Amino acid sequence: MSRYDSSRYAVDLDEYPKIVSAVVPGPESRAWHGRCTKYFMGLSSQVKLFPVAFESGCGCTLRDVDGNRYIDFSSGIYVTTLGHCHPKVTEAVRKYAGQLMNAHDFTTKIKTLLCEKLAQVLPGDLTGYQFYDCGTAAVEAGMRVLRAAAGKHELLSCFYDFHGKTYGAVSLAEFRSAAYGATRAPGMHLLPRPNTYRPHWTKVDGSIDTDRYLEFYAEYLDRATANAVAGFVLEPIQGWGGSVMPPDDFFPKLRKLCDQRKILLMADEVLTGWARTGKWLCMEHWGVVPDVVAIGKGFGNGFPVTCIAVREPYKEKLEAISASSSYGGNPMACAAALASTEVIEEEGLLEHGLHLGELFRRRMERWKERFNIVGDTRVKGCLMGVELVKDKQSKEPFEEAGKRVYQRAFRKGLAWIPAGHILRMSPPVVMPDNVAHKAMDIIEESIAEVEKELR
């Protein structure tokens, strides 16, 4: 078995992180940001809160246009799982950029090799594939497969999951519909999902009652248009919703319910797949094989390539929905995805991702005891979240603290992701232990300073 070699990704911690400008973002960043935003609109909250202009990246580090150096603790946004500019991925894209850039959905050698590799690494009988250029397109294709395979049209999804920004994907998540100026499509049913920190239903001992959620789903199906429901679409772990992780018995029980009710199960693994949680698919943590899977973000390590994978009994439905796209299976995209997959295998990154997750878990568990504003910490491999609250009893969200901790850590040289009162983290899985500890130190210092300010 291949083992992780930290020397490949060594970082001089005397040089990273290092802030050299008097203020950050520095003057060059502010100037470039000002020029860009005369035209470029619709920025994410992480940019609005810290409008830095990046210039280069290598491994798990970044540089901005002012020369400031950062530890990358976001991987873009769950994307550069192997770090920036991995040599093997870079060379694979360079080769096909000079050889064959697009052939629509005609067969190419590189696409065939990628399909064969997927059949080797994916669990169960996920043997039907199609490729796209963004996660939303893969989710939309998955929805069409569910409907074609089941011969039904309605779908179930969960509050605060996130599935993309086109009409169908937005309709899977009500909290996004109003923001996008859209009403939800008909036939889309929203249900609550288990949140161990904020449960709707609990047992006598106060622990989350997973069975009650499943009973609610069954009751809902009995009262709703059950015969018209084609499938249930979920994120294994909520991303935008705050790195919310389900109890371990949830997905096995949901798989059983779906089978009983003849409803197909689709996992949106755009964010959670391809080593992000220490597995090819996050669903493997619970021994569950979904009927349809959307894969993206880290799949091409920054190159825009995503995938839909369908179980053997339903893969012919990819033909029925006319699944091909103009850019999805282009040779550069397939080369990036194949190279990324091979790197994960060759460098032992699934195992290292699990190792990092345990390192992060041990560090973050102590924060709940040390800090009054840390209500909960969540870790699965290299996908983490910290929930900040005003009071541990009421669990009232503390958004001002979230904003300040995010900005404070960024000024110290940590590039990462905010989500209101929840701090999200997704470092590259290639990160050496000493860099991971340094990043944790920065976050810990920032929480301590902000808690003192807001006391």
Image: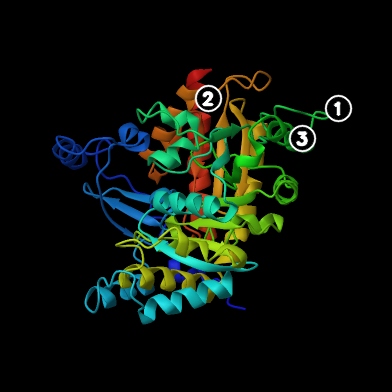
**Relative to 338, is 68 on the left or the right?**
left
Residue at the (45%, 31%) spot, across then down: 184
Cα separation between marks 3 and 1: 17 Å
Q: Which numbered dot is residue 215?
A: 3
Tell me the kind of residue under disc 3. Answer: Glu
Give the residue type at disc 1.
Answer: Val
Q: Residue 355: horizontal and vertical position, in percent?
A: 62, 60
Q: Secondary structure at mark 3?
A: helix
Q: Is residue 206 something that shows in the picture?
A: yes
Q: CA distance from mark 2 to mark 1?
A: 33 Å
Residue hosting label 2: 451
Quadrant where the N terminus is found in the figure: bottom right
Question: In this orientation, which residue lies closer to the viewer: 49 or 318?
Answer: 318
Give the foreground label among 2 and 1.
Answer: 1
Residue that numbered label 1 is attached to? 204
- First in sequence, mark 3 or 1: give its number: 1
User: Seen in the image, is 23 located left or right of residue 369?
Assistant: left
Occupied quadrant, residue 103: bottom left
Q: In the image shown, does 214 or 83 lie closer to the viewer?
A: 214
Q: CA distance from mark 2 to mark 3?
A: 41 Å
Residue 106 falls left or right of residue 380: left
Mark 2, secondary structure of its residue: helix
Residue 443, relative to residue 119: is it above or below?
above
Residue type, mark 2 in image: Glu
Up/down of 390 relative to 266, above or below: above
The image shows residue 2, relative to residue 429, as above or below, that is below
Local crowd size for mark 3, using a 10 Å CA cut-off: few (<14), some (14–19), many (≥20): few
Q: Is residue 115 left or right of residue 34?
A: right
